[in-house]
Amino acid sequence: MPVLAEVRERLRRERPLDGVSVSACLHVTAETANLMRALVAGGAQVGLCAANPLSTQDDVAVALAQRHGATVLAARGESAAQYAQHVQTLVASAPQVTIDDGADLVSAIHESAPSHAAEMLGGTEETTAGLLRVRALAEQGTLACPVLAVNESRTERAFNDRFGTGQSTIDGILRATNLLLAGRTVVVLGYGWTGRGVALRARGAGASVIVCEVDPLRALEARMEGYEVMGALAAAERGDVFVTVTGGRDVLRGEHFERMKDGAVLANAGHFDVEIKLADLRALAVGGRREALPLVEEHTLANGRRLNLLAQGRVVNLAAGEGHPASVMDMSFAGQALCVEHLVANAGRLRPGVLPVPEEIDDEVARLKLESLGVRIDELNEDQRVYRSAWEHGA
């Protein structure tokens, strides 16, 4: 992770985070550990809990706590009650900055300690689902601190979502099932940046791809890019593998399950395990449920058809795979570290609300990444810069 390493070394030299309390609710992986190390190097007091009980790498959690001075509250497979307790422990530590993957931490602070929320320097949010929650707080007039929309930064959208989740979702599905995608039909529900990446990688593996969308412009884009586009009920009859990636809930429900082929595979690449309506799936499984493979739960319907749910409906790229390649998270977490520095440097000057990531942070991350790849690009000369900001030049 050369980009984050460069950021970490500068933070170590300058110590801009000295004494600042930072709490994070993220997937506890080696890549996340590198982000925590960068924050510690900058002087921060760091606490970390897991954003998903099936994504925690226990060896990483132990090493981060024992060797790098972070407080880590996470264990693979922890119960919902344990997870809630870990979040509340971080809330009680009164962090000045939060880093979220799903908005659980910042939401818990606003619910349990609203007076502290107003004193925070701010937070960052890395997921679409999390930003929906934070924006709901803002619309209610209860969001008391600035939250940087990391998920919507240019580097995050292009690299984390499209290339990172696109590849790692397919990887998680293949690890769990060992399916051959070539010749099969993959249905992608949601055509945001992540859905585009999943569709592209599935097509590259030889699958026929159907896209389902509720946004007319995204649906049109998918059609213009060569995919079949149709409603989810029609696609339910055609698909062999279904991937939900919408940030919403109940995208696949009972009426969809009833139309699916025998052996259909259901995978979720959205952050929360609500995109596949699990209650409907279990209610239809009158023929029983069994573990067909370690991460594959087979549900037998009344007519004998079997539907295979991957990783309990949790985010499949992390629960069944190893998540994004480190080279993707390198850029994402470098951006996160710079956003924390930005919140600290601008204490008291940022208004409460969901704010965009400053362009200079995106530019710095991209510059460092190109540098690590040995890529050099041109720069505008003075005349070109003037031309871009002038109105006098026309036809």
Image (spheres, grey):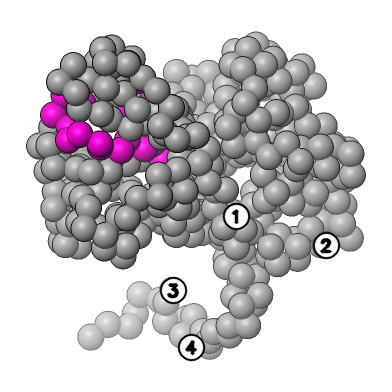
Residue at mark 3: 389
Camera-nearest label, 3 or 2: 2
Residue at mark 2: 9
> Where is residue 364 drawn, in percent x and y?
63, 65
Per the rendered image, the range of residues in magenta is 255-278
Q: Quick one: SS at disc 2?
A: helix
Horizontal arrangement in the rendering, residue 128 relative to residue 257 (left or right)? right
> Where is residue 312 drawn, in percent x and y?
44, 27
Question: Rounded to the nearest whole Å, what is the CA distance between mark 4 and mark 2?
Answer: 36 Å
Residue at mark 1: 329
> Where is residue 252 drawn, in percent x and y?
26, 28
Q: Residue at x 54, y 84 (%)?
A: 377
Q: Quick one: SS at disc 3?
A: helix
Camera-nearest label, 3 or 1: 1
> Where is residue 187 drawn, in percent x and y?
23, 45
In-front residue for pair 88/62: 62
In magenta stretch: residue 268: yes
Q: Quadrant of residue 145?
A: top right
Sequence-first tag of 3 and 2: 2
Residue at mark 4: 383
| Kind of residue sitting beneath label 3 | Ser
Camera-nearest label, 4 or 2: 2
Q: Quick one: SS at disc 1?
A: helix
Regarding residue 47, the answer to whether it shows in the image is no
